Every structure is written in C-alpha cells, then in structure tokens.
Image (cartoon, grey):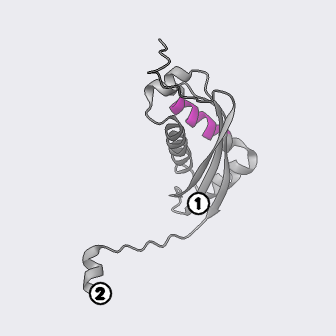
Amino acid sequence: MYWPLTTDFLEYPVVRQAVTLREQTLVTTDDKTVVIGGMMIFRVPQLITLVGETYWPDQTVKDLSLTAVHDVCCKLSWDQLKDEQRRGTLDTKLKNEAQAALKAYGVEVVKLMLTDLAPCRVLRLVNTQAEHKGES
C-alpha cells in the first residue's frame, strides 16, 4: 500500500546492466599467482526477490559474481586458464557458476567475462602496532 507522506520510493533498474568486477589475486592449481578482473552483464527479472532478500542488492550481485570467478579459476591451472580464455569456454563456465549463485536472488546473468588475466607476484607487508612501536 502506498501512503504519499510516509512511503519511501526506491528506484532500481531491472533492464540489462553491467557491473565491473574488481581485480582479485588468486592461486591456480599449479601454484601460479594470477590477477583476474572481469565484467558481468545481467538483468533483474524478479526485482521483488532481489530487493526483498538482500540488504544491498548491488553489493550482493558483485560479491556473488566475484565468488563465482574465484571458484571457477582456482580449479584450473595457468595453462588451462589461458587456453579456455582463448577458446571462449571460460566465459561460459563463469556465466554458469554466477547464474547458479544469483538465480536465488532473481538475477539473470547474460554474460560474464574476464577483462584482466595476468600472472603476478605478490608482496605483502605486514606491520602490527607491536612491531611498529619496537622500531621507534
């Protein structure tokens, strides 16, 4: 029921839209460290489900998509990743994994593709307050 003075109106698109998936660092099955980033194109045929089941719909879509990318790519070696990327089969695996995760929220994945795929080296600096105080 809509009451003009007390009802808040939230606008959310249901048509085709794209979301950029930030880069993430992961390790392949052959212990190669890679950086992977992507893009997902989706639409929302069941808006009530997405908005009703999530606190922050945009973040839910991104989080589940990033998880799908991680889950698929961690099960492959570096050579398999490159080969499947070149053949186009990796996009299909990514789309299917994301669709399985997002279907429960009323989201239809149109396409999920990688925009970044590169080997890398990770350097991590860890500095705790105790170590920092000892340096002073």
The image shows residue 120 at horizontal and vertical percentages of 58, 67
Identify the secondary structure beneath mark 2.
helix
Amino acid on which disc 1 is placed = Val
Q: Which mark is residue 114?
A: none
Amino acid on which disc 2 is placed = Glu
The image shows residue 16 at horizontal and vertical percentages of 69, 31
The image shows residue 67 at horizontal and vertical percentages of 50, 44
Which residue is rendered at x = 68% and y = 48% of the image? 84
Residue 114 belongs to the span the image colors magenta: no
3D distance between C-alphas at marks 1 and 2: 33 Å
Residue 96 belongs to the span the image colors magenta: yes
- Please give the range of residues in magenta: 92-102
The image shows residue 108 at horizontal and vertical percentages of 61, 28
Q: Which residue is mark 1?
A: 35
Q: Which mark is residue 135?
A: 2
Residue 19's quadrant in the figure? top right
Which residue is rendered at x = 41% and y = 74% of the image? 125
Q: Residues within 10 Å of mark 1 (few under 14, many from 20)?
A: some
